[in-house]
Amino acid sequence: MVVWLSAVISAQAEVPGAVRAERLVKQLELADKCPDAMYALWQLGSDAVPALSRALRDPRIEVVESACAVLQEMGEVAAPVTTHLQRELGKSEGRRKQALKWALRAVTSQTIAVTSWQGTVVFLDKKGKVVKEYKGFSNLWGVQLLPDGNCLVAQSGGTEIIEVTADGDVVPNPDVELGPGLRAQRMLNGNTLIAGNSSFVRELDAAGKVVWKYDKMGVTATRLLNGHTLVVSSQDKTLVEIGRDGKVVKSWKIPAMVYGVRRLPNGHTLVATRTNHHLLELDADGKTITSTRVIGEPNDVLRYADGMTVIAGKDGVTAYDPAGKELWTHELQWAGCLAR
């Protein structure tokens, strides 16, 4: 029996990625299996792109939205699907069009957005060159790039989360006031996940109603494709992963003063630790795989598919190659959050 089971596991591991992707895409129509299928498709990377591309033609909006959410998370890995996204976008409307716009922006954009506590949002290209910047805000922390060219900006110190246009103007008279927060993540369904120093982590729907919450303060929160939520709890110096049912799935002790975490497709998690000037990479069990000293006091981190790592911290934004060699630095006083 043990031998047979081992053979089955081995056979599953040897299934080509493209074949697994086809099977997973078929699960996007099943509400109970869709979130885990989305997460698994993201982990497959480029092997899943052809199957996801075909899913964009599905008549069911739920399947299209799920496929687009995965492509959005993949970013430049899914660049080969650009032409197909553009073609589908040209003949779509409503929710389908919105979902395709989210995916298209993510797979084609090379822009890195970074906030400064001095009230500036700076947009850099992948080589560190300034593309544009917005000035005149206060206590900036979180930022997210939206598909229409706007960005969502979180201002600390009790200041309202706002949406800023592509020209740097605040969107006037929003339909819903999101309240204060350090980080805000707008999702494809229109809901917004918010984390802040002085309030519990909450998810608001498009009407501003709280539809999910975690009853602890969190300095950052990220919704993953499988519906789980990564939260850095400032109260007990812990990184927690919360399941769709609201229960803690995993919990890891982390150093003090952590504001930036990123889940990687391989299941590892990057943790930027300001107090000891290090970037940690934790495996799925929370064990430290690597601990790399970086410039300044890091607040956030991004990693590209090609291995380039970008870190925002006290003295600005610095990019490193996969071997840890510094590629470029953009000086910026107290850079806070990164987005692309």
Image (spheres, helix red, strand yellow):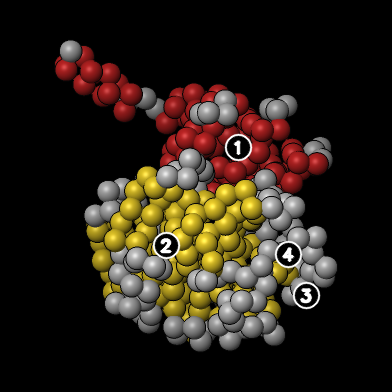
Choose the circle earlier in sequence order: 4 or 3.
Answer: 3
| Residue assigned mark 2 | 232
Q: Amino acid at mark 2?
A: Val
Choose the circle earlier in sequence order: 1 or 4.
Answer: 1
Callout 3–callout 1 Cβ contact below 8 Å:
no
Q: In what quadrant of the picture does the N terminus appear?
A: top left
Callout 2–callout 4 Cβ contact below 8 Å:
no
Callout 1–callout 4 Cβ contact below 8 Å:
no
Label 2 residue SS: strand
Instruction: In the rendered structure, find residue 177 and report the number of the disc placed on it.
Output: 4
| Residue assigned mark 3 | 169
Q: Nearer the viewer, mark 4 or mark 3?
A: 4
Q: Residues within 10 Å of mark 4 (few under 14, many from 20)?
A: few
Choose the circle earlier in sequence order: 3 or 2.
Answer: 3
Q: Quadrant of residue 86?
A: top right
Q: How many marks?
A: 4
